[in-house]
Amino acid sequence: MRKYSLSLLLISFLTGCNVSKYIPKNEKLFYGSEINMRADSTVGKDETSTLKSQLEELARPNPNSRLFGFPYKVWFYYYIGEPKKENGLRAWLRRKLGQPPVFASAKALSSNSLIFTSYLENNGYFRSTAQGALVEVEKKPYFNKAVYQVQVQPRYYLDSISTVADSTPAGKALVQASKGRGTLLKEGDPYRFDVIKAEQQRIHQRFQQQGFFYFQPNYIAFLADTNYATRRMRLYLALKPDMPNAAGLQYYVRNIYIYPNYTLSVGGQTEAINDTSKVNADRYKDFYISDSTRSYKPKLFEDVVSLRPGRRYNSRAQDLTLSRFINLGTFKFVRNRFQPLEERDSTFLDVHYYLTPSPKKSIRLELAGLTKSNSLAGSQLTLSWRNRNALRQAELLTINGYAGIDFFVGGGDTLGLTNHRFGLETSLTFPRLVSPIRFRYDRRQLLPKTILTLGYDLIVRRQLYNLNQFRTSFAYAWQKNAQIEQTFQPFGIAYVRVANFGPRFYNILATGSDANANELLRILQGSQLILNSVYSVSYNSSPRTSGRRTFRTSFNVEPAGNIAGLLIKDRDEDKVKTLFGVPIAQYVRVDIDNRYYYRLSPGMTWANRIAAGVGAPYGSSNQMPFIKQFFVGGSNSIRAFRPRGVGPGIYNRPREDGQTFVLQDGGGDIKIEGSTELRPKFNSFLQGAIFLDVGNVWMFKDTLAYNDGSQFSKDWHKQLAVGTGVGLRLDLSYFVLRFDLAFPLRKPYLPDGERWVFDQISFGSRSWRRENLILNIAVGYPF
């Protein structure tokens, strides 16, 4: 009853707000565009529907936002009034709450008609027409809408594609490029102007890669011969006869000059240009390098620059060189200049690279609020020192020290636990492969990286225990293109040590439940030596895509203890292999994460995620290290459950006093998780969300700490937790602040047949809200 009363109150408020009194005389608000399609019989219904949707997206202007048909933002715009100060409170309120009125315009009708006609012709529907008129909206006298009558004619298709060229190098290159495997024009395809433009750009790139330095896309002509009766088109490709002579010549690189200490000041520019003579540059193999301070080893530029003297100019090598310079991180600005030789009929170029270095050393102090995937929130103080050219070949040396505190956020159950974090990490990144074995890799890629890391982390679980982790790793990272990234860690070492057990730990061990005691025994056995290797690959949609669909897939595989298990023979009393008396973890861990985004409209995105992982202990290990286990629940997982609050399986974690969960360390060896989320965009800084999360974790084989229902079985789908909720996101430019309010729909730890809890939902019940509603506060999107 309360909901209906609120709805009636809102409707009464909106109807009481009269916006028509603010609208200027002879003006009407624009309600939107309506398109009536009349298509030829050869154009199918699905095709007509698609065309209508595309024309609707092209229609301009966009109408003002409305709520129950009322232009509430326009009302706010007029009601707040004209601000006296540009940066005052009234101006801010008007910008955030209001919206300038969009009036109906006859000029927009003619503009849209031309746009619609042009779009149809560009897609092969020649001789189509579009006409529009303004019509008053029924029962809304201060609104006008645009109604368009669009006549769609039959579509033209490509009958044949031919190339007209002479025997010059440019003519031969055109024939070769137009008949290659990558051509975008196919016989039988419908005529599309954007495809022809894309083919023009593709051929231009092929020319540039073959040394035609001055060749431009508009030097390629496309001639069409149409047949009205059959709606077929013959397409001819040719070079324009007025193309400059230089555009048809292939150019070669003569000398390459590099200035690694270039400055953007006027004096620096003059000095850099004057330094293009050999007098001020030292010769190193194929390059002339002007580096009087000897800040960089010449070998660095040999690795970065792909162009070579005496070779033909190639735009792909040039683009790769610029990308490599930028990705080094040691240069703030990168410029280049090509200088043709002044000799008559010369086809040689001198290449100049002007590199402005970033400050070599920097120090930064950060104080930040943060959230983690397990719904830990808190603050962290980080002191970071960087050297961007540590060994004179653009090596990045980073030393980070941090201290922080974590506490759990969200409604529902109060955990009553606080973590203190301390750590120190040093990493050295080489912009090349560092290895005693010579690796061969594709030189057409960005430079690979070698990353050496050494670190120590300490987590203090107050009154429970301390978790110490010493770690080091050696890894290679390389990027095949903008879509594929790979990392290979040949070896990593982590020594995990649990110490300083507190009074609460022993009290639970002595007087707590058997399940809690068993879990604590697992923690007591948590000191391990992890000798692992990791391979990771991520594949995402092209960053240049303009389509509605984008995606990202990441895959990781991590074997541990395999080589050590073969070489080491020492065992403890439990038959577990040890090194220096420390148990060695043996396992294989695999996980995959798929994310898919579909833009339903400019203001609505549908986001999805499916993640799964398996960790299998083997050899002398009968369980996964708990720092390597999977877990679900929390602000970046199933948001209707507390952090690590689901599973494994049907396990229900006991509480110390009937209210407080004691332990947060349990996880599982197997994870299946999925989420789907609608993300409406209200304005530039405010977004919403409606989401559904599902998933659980299970044990692979060890169930001693839990129960039989915690092990993965054929009934896994009957043990999935399900939660739903709504969210609000504040886009503050530098980061997104997220609030997600969630509640469970299915609780796997309840008896079979009682796990769906739809019938228990009661937002009016205080006890239900306290038990089930969880507010997740986080930074960034959940996926």
Image (tube, rainbow, N blue to C red):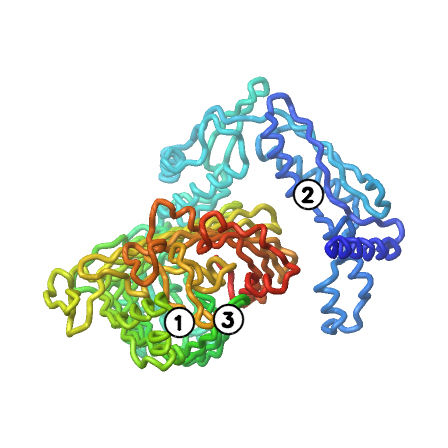
Nearer-N-terminus badge (2/1) = 2
Q: The disc labelled 1 sits on which kind of residue?
A: Asn
Nearer-N-terminus badge (3/1) = 1
Q: Nearer the viewer, mark 3 or mark 2?
A: 3
Q: Nearer the viewer, mark 2 or mark 1?
A: 2
The reply to whether the C-beta atoms of the residues labelled 2 and 1 are less than 8 Å apart is: no
- What residue is disc 2 on? 59
Q: Quadrant of residue 445?
A: bottom left
Q: Quadrant of residue 522?
A: bottom left
Q: Residue at x 80, y 66 (%)?
A: 80
Callout 1: 10 Å neighbours few (<14), some, many (20+)? Answer: few
Q: Tell me where residue 199 appears, x and y as whole percent.
A: 46, 39
Mark 3: which secondary structure? loop
- What residue is disc 3 on? 414
Give left or right: position of 138 versus 116: right
Q: Residue at x 34, y 74 (%)?
A: 509
Q: Tell me where residue 225 appears, x and y as whole percent.
A: 53, 25
Mark 1: which secondary structure? helix
